[in-house]
Image (tube, rainbow, N blue to C red):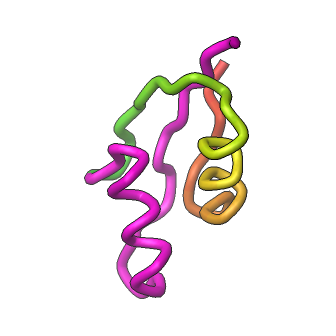
């Protein structure tokens, strides 16, 4: 599998609790942090859930 880099670009303030929990599970705890994960279906599903808060970095 390939890896993807995920960057948090919007604040988690005001987001529902389940979206905050998803960001924590991805390892994103602060703005503008970048994490790298394998592109598995579960990770892609988590990214889809918080797509308005994150961006995929090339």
Q: Quadrant of residue 34?
A: top left
Q: Residue at x 65, y 35 (%)?
A: 56
**31 relative to 40, above or below:** below
**12 relative to 22, above or below:** below
Q: Quadrant of the C terminus?
A: top right
Q: Is residue 55 left or right of residue 41?
A: left
Q: Quadrant of the N terminus?
A: top right
Q: Residue at x 51, y 26 (%)?
A: 37
Q: Residue furthest left?
A: 29
Q: Name the spot of residue 35 as percent of width and height, x first.
A: 41, 30
Q: Quadrant of residue 17?
A: bottom left
Q: Is residue 8 left or right of residue 29?
A: right
| Nearer the observer, 5 or 43 | 43
Q: Quadrant of residue 53?
A: bottom right
Q: Is residue 36 left or right of residue 42?
A: left
| Residue 22 colored in magenta in the image | yes
Q: Residue at x 49, y 39 (%)?
A: 7
**12 relative to 17, above or below:** above
Q: Name the spot of residue 36 as percent of width and height, x first.
A: 47, 24
Q: Residue at x 39, y 71 (%)?
A: 20
Q: Name the spot of residue 46 as percent of width and height, x first.
A: 60, 55
Which residues fall within the magenta stretch? 1-29
**6 relative to 14, above or below:** above
For the image, the number of numbered tags is 0
């Amino acid at each position: 599998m390939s890896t993807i880099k995920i960057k948090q670009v919007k604040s988690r303030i005001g987001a529902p609790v389940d979206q905050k929990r998803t960001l924590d599970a991805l390892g994103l705890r602060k703005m503008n942090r970048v994490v790298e994960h394998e592109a598995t279906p579960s990770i892609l599903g988590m990214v889809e859930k918080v797509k308005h808060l994150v961006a995929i970095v090339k």
